[in-house]
Image (cartoon, rainbow, N blue to C red):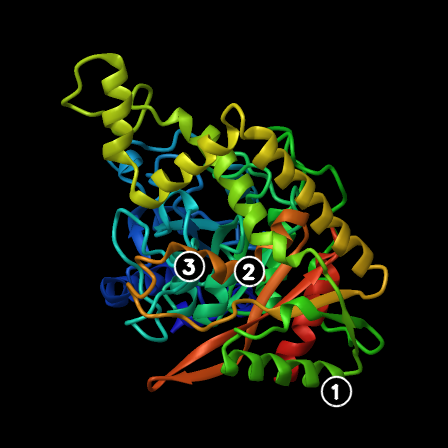
Amino acid sequence: MLASSTIAALRKGITAGDITPRDIVLDVAKSIETRNAEIGAYLSWDVDAALAEADHADITKPLGGIPIAIKDNMNVTGQPCTCGSRILSENYTAPYDAGAIQRLRASGAIPFGRLNMDEFAMGSSTENSALGVTRNPRDLTRVPGGSSGGSAAAVAGDLAIAALGSDTGGSIRQPAALCGCVGIKPTYGRVSRYGLVAFASSLDQIGPVTKTVEDAALLLNHLCGHDAHDSTSLNVEVPDFTASIGRDIKGLRIGLPKEYYIDGIHAGVSASVQAAIRQLESLGAIIEEISLPHTELGVATYYVLAPAEASANLARFDGVRYGHRSSSAGDLMEQYTKSRSEGFGPEVKRRILLGTYMLSSGYYDAYYIRAQKARTLIRNDFTEAFKKVDVILSPTSPTPAHKLGELKDNPLAAYLEDVFTIPVNLAGLPGISLPCGTVEVEGSALPVGLQIIGKALDEATVLRVAHAYEQSR
């Protein structure tokens, strides 16, 4: 089954002449048609368009002929880009390729399929999509995580070779952890945000979801790079990330932040992470306890800054230029109000209201400015910690995947699921999640994710440690 294979293996098969890009696309399409009805990872897919690209793929390029599934908040020319929202699901077709898509095409890859997500990337379960629920392929009664739940479910369920997701507070790493695959958030600015529909512009970052660490490194090689269309894009050299994997980790210092190893973590998650720590130590890594003292401010800081940026970014969806337009409005103000009320779901409305409140007169200094100061403290904590260690290790999520609907009426509990991932976005650092075991819950073996955090622009060391651990298991 080609859909269950890796990028690295498929590229060898293509180069050797054993398989063709058409073979791969057809096998992925068959897998989608067989399992997507029960998993709900894809919102749409165009087999004919993908086959046309496959038949003309330049197989001499590094990703030549490999289909990559795309989270539905990245523009791909001629395809829908719904962001999991009713406001964009009716009549919007992307007129251009996002920067990340341009880079994929330049490397020979084929964008194939649109993946479900929490509406406008706001959520941790993919239950907030207006277009249907995505289920965890490891247990169909449970969530896949979010907001890139479609990306993780597609890769873990072998409905995709690999996928792109976006990560604002853990939205690549957390679903990768809950579904049992690999997901990496690069350093902020490493990958162009041009053509990514904005949620929180100072936090959003595109990254790959893959079956292996090697595949994550391969995709990063061709996603990273400066883009003049994105003012936050970093004009720095992009190393060959695959060159860093395969090296031993003897002597590398791994920090364990005491604030991340606390009561409240699921016992099975804790046991799996502790076993991973012992495994890394057996490979020659030096384990040290460190402190990130302002960790407790992370979630509160995020839920001031992210909604504030969202309220500004989502103001463009007004029913005038594109997207859902109410048919029952009278005057212009009613047109705005009804279009947005009908088009946005409850979680998006909640965050717009929160963000607008934070930015309103009399509260801007009390909330938004204070949150920016707290963000600086969190960033400084990481700067000090990285003077002592090379990477930082923690659980990705404090719990395994919960049941569908279990946290529907408890948004605060859902927000706390990102407690270990949010600080990484606030500090703009790279972080990866990879499987480190399973925990038995009600007869299901649910995946546990291990998070490895690195210094800014040091994805190479993050991948090196992740690959060493992955291969040792």
What residue is drawn where x is 52% and y is 67%? 397
Q: Secondary structure at mark 2?
A: loop
Q: Residue furthest left?
A: 328
Earlier-in-chain disc, 2 versus 3: 3
Quarter the C terminus occupies:
bottom right
Is residue 443 visible to the viewer in this orientation of the structure? Answer: yes
Residue 288 placement (x, y as % from top left): 79, 75
Spot occupied by residue 336 in the image (x, y as percentages of width and height)? 29, 21
Which label's residue is closer to the chain start, 2 or 1?
1
Amino acid type of disc 1? Ser
Residue pictured at 61% horizontal, 50% vertical? 425
Q: Residue type at mark 2? A: Val
Task: Look at the numbered discs 2 and 3 and tell me whether their residues touch, using CB distance below 8 Å.
Answer: no
Density class for disc 1 (Cα within 10 Å; few <14, some 14-19, many ≥20) is few
Q: Which mark is residue 414?
A: 3
Q: Nearer the viewer, mark 3 or mark 1?
A: 3
Rendered position, 110 above or below 31: above
In the rendered image, which residue does mark 1 sit on?
282
Question: Residue 419, which numbered label?
Answer: 2
Please identify the quadrant where the N terminus is shown: bottom left
Is residue 76 visible to the viewer in this orientation of the structure? no
